[in-house]
Amino acid sequence: MKLRFKKGLDLSLAGAVKSSEISKYEPDECAIVPDDFSGFIPKLMVREGDSVKVGSPIMHDKISEDLYLVSPVSGTVKAIIRGDRRKIMRVVITNDHKYECVSFDTKATVKELLASSGLLAMLRRRPYDVVVRTAVRPADIFVTALDTAPLATTLVSRLPNDALTVLTRAVEALSGLTEGKVNVSVGDDWTFGDLPGAVMHTVSGPHPAGNVGVQVSAIAPAGQGREVWTLDIVTLYNIGLLLQTGVLNPWTEVAVTGPMVASPGLVKTNPGAALAGMLKDRTTTDAHLRVISGNVLTGTAVGAEDSFLRFPYRQITVIAEGDDVDEFMGWASMKPSKLSVNAALPFSRLTRLFSPDARMNGSRRAMIMSGEYERVLPMDIMPEFLLKAIIGRNIPEMEALGIYEISPEDFALCEFVDTSKLPIQQIIRDGLDFLRKENE
Amino acid sequence: MSKLRKLLDRAKPHFSPGGRLSALGSVFDGVETFLYTPRTTAPANNTVHIHDAIDSKRTMIMVVLALMPCFFFGMYNTGYQHWLAAGCTTFPFFDLMLYGFLAVLPRVVVAYVVGLGIEFIVAQIRKEEIQEGFLVTGLLIPMICPVEIPLWMLAVATAFSVIFVKEVFGGTGYNIFNVALVTRAFLFFAYPAQMSGDDAFVPTSTPLGFGPAVPDGFTCATPLGQVATTVGDSLSITGVDGAAITSWDAFLGLIPGCFGETSVLCILIGAVILLLSGIGSWRIMLSVAAGALLMGWVANTFASPVYPASYLTPVDQLLYGGLAFAAVFMATDPVTAARTSTGKVVYGLLIGIIAVIIRTYNNGYPEGAMLAVLLMNAFASLIDWCVVQTNISRRRARFAKLIKD
């Protein structure tokens, strides 16, 4: 199936990765952050001082008890950081740089293997966009081979040239987990041809075309009584690799990007790697920087304390924080350097690459302008009315307007363009969590 | 750091809770965010980290900008009509502008002081930021009223509509009816003598003693006022000096009428600004015009002496009265208009149609644009509801089919 999305928006930001050269960075510490895995309620399985290998279980989910988060490196558990009400914020592991791996039993069932190796936790399910339940067989599985987010690098180049057999193996394994089909959406950069056993879709269009949720919505939407699982092509490859070799791939490729990065580039490192060393010579020492683990639309801003690579472990973006800027009558400014897609700032068209900072550029208002969100949301959903239903906790209306199809990331661009500066992704996350609590 | 910024930083503690002037906290906040873009940055997670540079302040200021051609023309025309009424034959440009300025300035000041005053107080009580919606409303109010409306009436009407149409619903963004139009409606029904009739629309006073004197007892009705009282089937519309008014005069706007809404040319310039900046909805503007032309054509085709306005051509329906202004600046208010694309077209069409129906088939009201917009404000949510229901049914059908397969 050909999917051609028209709505959406490609933001041109400074700091894109230009060379395909990859440097290697072995972090001294890695962290696992359970918050990255929405819906995962962590139960610790290690204590401080325990020694672990690549693939050793660190915690499991309290709902699906056989769903694990595992160590990305070998070494010792350095610290378990807790927050309010003893919530587990992260588990920090010291890397001994030996990369000793746990050998998984490849004769176990696929689901057991995936769950115990931590790879199943990298999948998401819709409705709700949270980690999967191991007891459920999804109606379909969707894989996206695209990342269209601002400054993101292609996912396909992260796969080795001979990845086809590994991917085929993974598709075959996942097919056994679902009632339906394994759907793989690929872009122009796809070089592997059709994957045997998978339904292939060709996707084109501006961001968020690469978001798996947008693709699912166009192909066969999720809904009540129809749960689908989603993942990206790199996770699919890692699944294949695990099935083939019995060990977990401890490496991930990260694009270090953003207007405040002196030399944007690709770095091979471990999931959850400490960022301080990785970014040391790449950014200025200015205190007013925002290091985002992820892209500018959906990533997490990390501080000095919790500066670790966060799921999905593939991009870092550094922008100016902007909390030290005094802008006189900014609402009247027509500076071409202001990032805007709005015609009320006509001169922004003249700028080719923007270097925005993290300021809200205005204060929060009620929803005033209409039709803003629709232009950047390529789904058959009426975003404004759905958001109002969520804010009002009107369950029948949320369901009718399509809350089961969406995830916060699909609405990230709506939040970007919003004149009223509403926290749209947070509203959706809260709405999904509220409904899940009601229904499950 | 600039001196102004330092001054604000020094003053800030006094206006913060616990400070001596904390009762004026919302005012300070309003001034500060007006002068300097807030430094607030995005939260750490579940958020976008960059935001479009557009904000509600800029949106509102674009609308104010779009109103400026009409406003300046209103100043000129106010002077022009006064000079005509005084029987003058020369029309010195700057004198006319000054006269218009002196006539309208007190109305603008009263509207802003009363409206913003209430907004400031409410913001302080609610501990919210002052919102900029009234920047536009406060300018619209004097533009859609006769220029000589007594100031106290304007103050009462503005206070009424800001409190009962906006604040009780929750403030900017929550109102059902257009605040400026309700102000006008309030005046229209509470003080009909000052809002209609033959002596309301031509300025006869001399503010601060400026301008030529107009003979006592001078009257001249607006074109639509004259149409409504026509007997027989031949319309003759005359201006202040007794000369006939042509469609071209109406397009330029040199006719008696409310301060800001006579010139279709300037309204079109405003429309272009709103459309180019992406703030006004072309769907609504076009569909109001289409609805008015359609209904004007129907009325004109079945013209009858019982309804003299039916002798106006469809284009004249758009050129006279406040319909063009309503189409561009009133119907397009995003808060009170329909919010779905299809809904906007239906909403606009109905405004155009109803405005002409009221004008034509109700001799008691020479102008129907205000009532048409207010009526459709009430129905906007219903129109949207219907559009949303079609989306819901389509989605439901698609999902049911998917489950069945």
Image: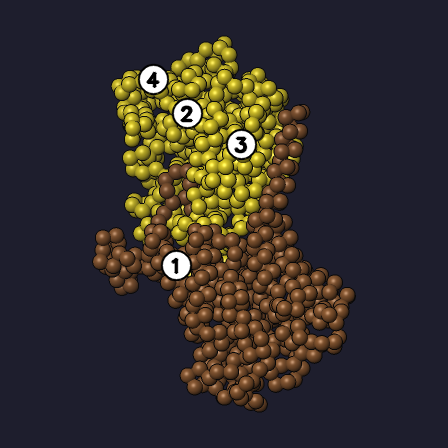
For this orientation, the residue located farthest to the right is B301
Q: How is the image coloured?
A: by chain
Q: Which residue position is annotated with label 3?
A: A404
Q: Is residue A16 left or right of residue A73?
A: right
Q: Which residue position is annotated with label 1?
A: B119
Q: Quadrant of the C terminus of chain B?
A: top right
In this view of the protein, can residue B395 be seen by the observer? Answer: yes
Q: Which residue position is annotated with label 4?
A: A45
Give the colour in which the image draws chain B. Answer: brown
Identify the residue at horizontal 43%, vertical 27% (top origin): A39
- State the separation of the CA atoms marked 3 and 2: 19 Å
Please report contact status of discs 4 and 1: CB closer than 8 Å, yes or no: no
Q: Who comes first in sequence, dot 2 or dot 4?
A: 2
Identify the residue at horizontal 61%, vertical 21% (top origin): A180
Protein chain holding label 1 = B
Give the colour in which the image draws chain A. Answer: yellow
Please report contact status of discs 2 and 1: CB closer than 8 Å, yes or no: no
Q: Position of residue A234 (x, y in %)?
A: 50, 27
- State the separation of the CA atoms marked 4 and 1: 57 Å
Q: Characterize the local packing of mark 2: few (<14), some (14-19) or many (20 or more) Cα atoms within 10 angstroms.
A: many
Identify the residue at horizontal 38%, vertical 30% (top origin): A35
Depth-wise, is mark 1 or mark 3 nearer the camera? 1
